[in-house]
Image: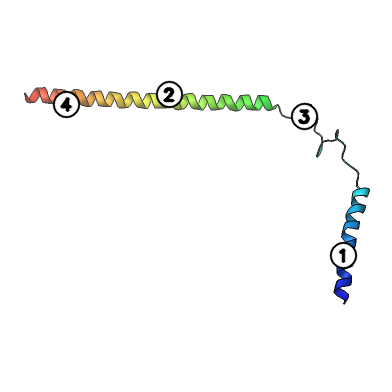
Amino acid sequence: MLAPCLLRRAILTVPLVFMVALFVTEPVRADQEAGTAIPAESRPCVDCHAFEFMQRALQDLKKTAYNLDTRTETLLLQVEKRNLCDCVAVNLLN
């Protein structure tokens, strides 16, 4: 008998509390930003950081390309040397 009465009170009280909370809180205006405002002069330059990041990425790509080029040259020289050695060995046998 007590449970239905408490349930009815809760059903009526919860929306009432939400309505009071809505009226008490101050609405957020469109010109307000969320969080704290940081002045522009103290914020890091996003474009500068992006540019530095891209420069470092380009340098890394250049190093990788150079390393691949050097490795390719080394492998080609090894193949040519092997072919010459095979050629010389075949000529010596004939």
**Of pointers 2 and 3, the one earlier in the residue sequence:** 3
Cα–Cα gap, marks 2 and 3: 40 Å
Of residue 19 and residue 61, the one placed in the foreground of this image is: 19
Q: Using the rendered view, name the quadrant where residue 13 is placed.
A: bottom right
Q: Secondary structure at mark 2?
A: helix
The residue at the point 78 percent across, 27 percent down is 40
The residue at the point 60 percent across, 28 percent down is 53
Q: Which residue is mark 2?
A: 66
Q: Mark 1 or mark 4, which is nearer to you?
A: 1
**Of pointers 3 and 4, the one earlier in the residue sequence:** 3
Q: Which mark is residue 42?
A: 3
Tell me how many marks there are. 4
Horizontal side of residue 68 vs 17, given as left or right: left
Q: Secondary structure at mark 4?
A: helix
10 w.r.t. 52: above or below = below
Q: Which mark is residue 10?
A: 1
Q: Mark 2 or mark 1, which is nearer to you?
A: 1
Rendered-image quadrant of the C terminus: top left
**Amino acid type, mark 4:** Asp
**Amino acid type, mark 3:** Ser
**Of pointers 1 and 4, the one earlier in the residue sequence:** 1
Cα–Cα gap, marks 3 and 4: 69 Å
**Amino acid type, mark 1:** Ala
32 w.r.t. 4: above or below = above
The residue at the point 77 percent across, 29 percent down is 42
The image shows residue 67 at horizontal and vertical percentages of 41, 27
**Of pointers 2 and 1, the one earlier in the residue sequence:** 1
